[in-house]
Image (spheres, rainbow, N blue to C red):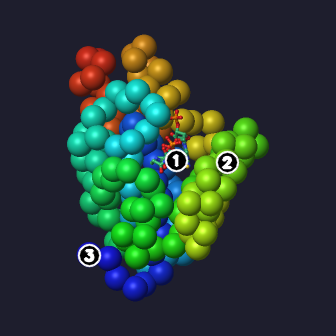
Amino acid sequence: MCSKKNIGVYPGTFDPLTNGHLSLIMRSTKIFDTVFVAVAADTSKKTLFSLDERIALAQQALSGAQNVIVEGFKGLLVDYVLKCNSRTIIRGLRAVSDFEYEFQIAMMNRKLIREIQTIFLITDYQWLYISSTIVKNVASLGGDVSDLVPHGVAIALQRKYSYNVQ
Ligand code: COA
């Protein structure tokens, strides 16, 4: 499955995948031959969706995307990156407030395996204000998030919180 092409790994909890993530993934495919969307099993977050659900929702949203592979991974991200025959982690930056956290994990990943680099893409302006948490919060209270997430995710949120999608 992995090859010697220019491969990028975009990791996240994706609980759930939003249009912000989607936009970043599609932009990454213009830079990399193959983009692995790596759904983390080991995350400090208490997730709404199980790992299998998070993977399935991302796979569904990206089913038409060329050169994108969605997989779950356990353990250290850097080990998974090497397994994909990649040396590059892709992350998105929305605001200055993201920087400190991203700086810390990029440094730690580089300390773990020196040849792994992290590159940052600036999130498109339409998605600067969204996060998975804010989407879940609005959805849990019956707010319309259908233009912020892929359709399958909107349906899945509807099922979790039992309300109707338009
Ligand atoms: N558009 C919209 N929202 C975005 C976004 C974008 N382009 N990029 C990030 N976000 C949001 C996410 O929705 C998420 O929101 P939330 O906090 O409300 O859930 C937040 O920004 C960042 O989350 P995410 O991108 O999912 O990353 P994460 O911080 O949850 O994931 C991992 C961190 C998976 C990279 C990290 O836990 C990991 O590497 N785990 C594996 C174990 C490991 O190696 N640990 C050591 C790391 S040093």
Query: Which tag is nearer the camera, tag 1 or tag 2?
Result: 2
When the figure is inspected, residue 4 is found, relative to residue 23, above or below; the finding is below
Mark 1 → mark 2, Cα distance in angstroms = 22 Å
- Residue 111 in picture, x, y percent from top left: 62, 60
Q: Residue at x 39, y 38 (%)?
A: 16
In the image, farthest residue toward the front: 112
Q: Is mark 1 within 8 Å of ligand 1?
A: yes
**Disc 3/disc 2 C-alpha distance (Å):** 31 Å
Is disc 3's CB within 8 Å of ligand 1? no
Mark yes or no: residue 97 visible: yes
Give amino acid for label 3: Met
Badge 2, how many Cα within 10 Å: few under 14, some, many 20+? few
Find disc 1 in the rendering and name its residue.
20
Neighbourhood count class around disc 3 (C-alpha, 10 Å): few under 14, some 14–19, many 20 upward:
few
Mark 1 residue type: Gly
Taking the image as shown, residue 134 lies to the left or right of residue 139, namely right
Task: Give the mark nearer the N terminus: 3 vs 2.
Answer: 3
On the rendered structure, is 18 left or right of 152? right
Circle 2 sits on which residue?
A: 104
Q: x and y percent of residue 55 in the render?
A: 28, 48
Q: Is residue 39 among what the camera can see?
A: no
Circle 1 sits in a helix, a strand or a loop, which is it?
helix
Residue at x-position 40% and y-position 37%:
15
Question: Nearer the observer, disc 3 or disc 2?
Answer: 2
